[in-house]
Amino acid sequence: MSASSVPTNILNEVFGYPAFRGQQQAIVHHVTAGGDALVLMPTGGGKSLCYQIPAIARQRAGHGVTLVVSPLIALMHDQVGALHEAGVAAAFLNSTQDWEQTEDIERRLLAGQLTLLYAAPERVGTPRFLGLLDTLHAHGALSLFAIDEAHCVSQWGHDFRPEYRQLTVLHERFAQVPRIALTATADDVTRADIIERLQLEHAKQFVSSFDRPNIRYAIVEKKDPTRQLLAFIEREHAGEAGIVYCQSRKRVEELAATLCEHGIDALPYHAGLDAATRQQNQDRFLRAEPDAGVVMCATIAFGMGIDKPDVRFVAHVDMPKNIEGYYQETGRAGRDGEPANAWMAYGLQDVVNQRRMIDESPAEADFKQVMVSKLDALLALAEATDCRRVRLLRYFGEASQPCGNCDNCLRPPDVWDATDCARKLLSTIYRVQQMSGIGFGAGHIMDIVRGKRTDKVAQFGHEQLSTFGIGAEFSEAQLRGVLRQLIAVGALHVDAQAYNTLKLLEPARPILKGEQPVRLRAATAAPARERTRKPRTATPAPAVAELDTAAQARFAALKAWRGEVAREHNLPAYVIFHDATLTAIAARAPRSLDDLQGISGMGATKLERYGEEVVRVSLSTGLA
Ligand code: ADP
Ligand code: ZN
């Protein structure tokens, strides 16, 4: 191996990073040597380098081009742009290009001028594309297949893309070409499915810790989610970038409008918007300066592959379907390693909705069963009174200790003995069913328990029930909380086919009989302790705050310069230089190119291309 194809040299020279992180080195060496790999690494863990460095190393050693399969057409431009900035010959082929552009790229591909080629899975399966690969292969110029977002191949992942299933053709047709598949998500079921579907039985598995210690997890009881969200943003994230996930397109639109009315620069994103609007909103979000406070309100259609490093919060105003989805979505916060928040508001209606969606789906029974158990795991997380992170990591097969950085660790929730309340609710549901021969929904059951003489109560004569008014001492919030948790633990079933009526299930029996105590999270009134927290205005990243006045001025000038370059190149600012790189430059007060040596993120190409400008801008503040 010549020095130029040694992975560590590529890391230093091309990317300007001093050292590999975590398992990167082991992965890069394995794949560079021609091994197959399955890489599980959390978002922000540094997956891209795991295939980009082997691609460069193998290209330099004469093995030809690496094909990167990625489902993210809308992001290919930026991914390839980032490689160009680092001086790497890369291109993408997708449906946004015209015939001329396509031909030009194919020509460069066949001329051996590309190190990486990005393509969407639906393109990879076409005869024309396979023909190109055949030609390359015949010339020994097909080096490596990198399959990004590999969980898309599995129906248990939350982003199933049937086109991923065709990717087995790569292995069948080009058996000698090594493959690396990467994903940030996969519980055991999904992992097994990826291996089977992509025929990766012989691939070496690299599983990193899934912990994201800088993310603080908090799950609050949903009351008025819009108001709660506004308070959360104003309290903790004024002027910062964030993503808010909603269940429906309609809700996305409403919420974005409401946030705008409150002076927050919010944008909508969902699959119902036309492609141009989606791309425009995505670009605005990605290209905004970190302190511009742009908030994306979105359905799950948004976010895969989003590599914006400075997203400071991810909020869920509706509950996702399972922990994989939740973890993947919240993982988009804090990729730069700085503190970030994952915040979710969750309530009875979420449980009812999610259960109903499963019931009403046309899927097979055993599929539904898996979905139900995945939902249950998320419900248990939401109701938990112990460390959220311990539960999250356990779900991904990792043991850990209480983290000290989640809501439950920071403010242990009050727990109350809800046995009596639960029994009163359950026996009312039982008696109502006995008396009227039909079930009723949560609202009516609560009215009976609290002794409210509504029209419906009168209509069915339910004031005659022995349980009428037996729970008058409980607030509606308490009853609602108990019902939600009884549904969550499987003691109650919500029958979507019959107006969301409540039915008793087997686990209700020991509770009804008083054999099993029920201890629940207290229904908190207003989160008073949260409100007393000091309001935070948009502060620069801590490292920036630590700079002296002169360095702050250099940082500001460098940021303005970076903004211009980014606009000129039509790329997000962080693709040019991360904030951390600008901070390091500002701190060093460079007077010559030499002074820029060894700054993390300053690769050879960037040094050559921007070094002199950076020194000039830095000196121009007159404070160097
Ligand atoms: P993901 O695993 O989510 O795809 P990325 O590959 O986008 O993560 O990497 C996350 C961030 O960490 C990127 O900004 C990348 O430049 C940075 N990074 C990755 N590896 C290293 C490293 N060895 N040293 C310094 N920064 C790194
Ligand atoms: Zn914790």
Image (spheres, helix red, strand yellow):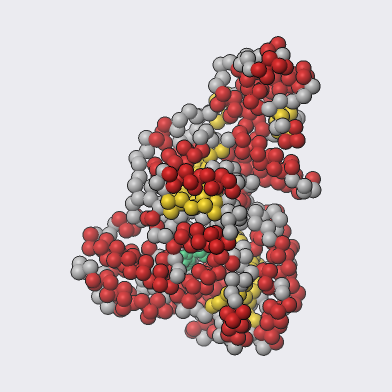
Q: Residue furthest left?
A: 622
Q: Quadrant of the C terminus?
A: bottom left
Residue at 75% over, 30% down = 506
**Residue 70, image x, y percentages:** 61, 67
Residue 311: in sight, yes or no? yes
Judge from the rendering whether residue 569 lies leftward or rightward of residue 619; answer left or right.
right
Residue at 54% over, 73% down = 52
Tally the numbered discs: 0
Residue 393 versus residue 476 in the image, above or below:
below
Residue 46 versus residue 257 in the image, above or below:
below
Residue at 61% over, 54% down = 272
**Residue 237, image x, y percentages:** 40, 47
Q: Quadrant of residue 484?
A: top right
Judge from the rendering whether residue 489 lies leftward or rightward of residue 611; answer left or right.
right
Q: Quadrant of the N terminus?
A: bottom right
Q: Quadrant of residue 417?
A: top right
Residue at 35% over, 45% down = 536
User: Depth check: 410 or 544 in front?
Assistant: 544
Residue 9: in sight, yes or no? no
**Residue 421, image x, y percentages:** 62, 21
**Residue 366, image x, y percentages:** 78, 47
Q: Quadrant of residue 464?
A: top right
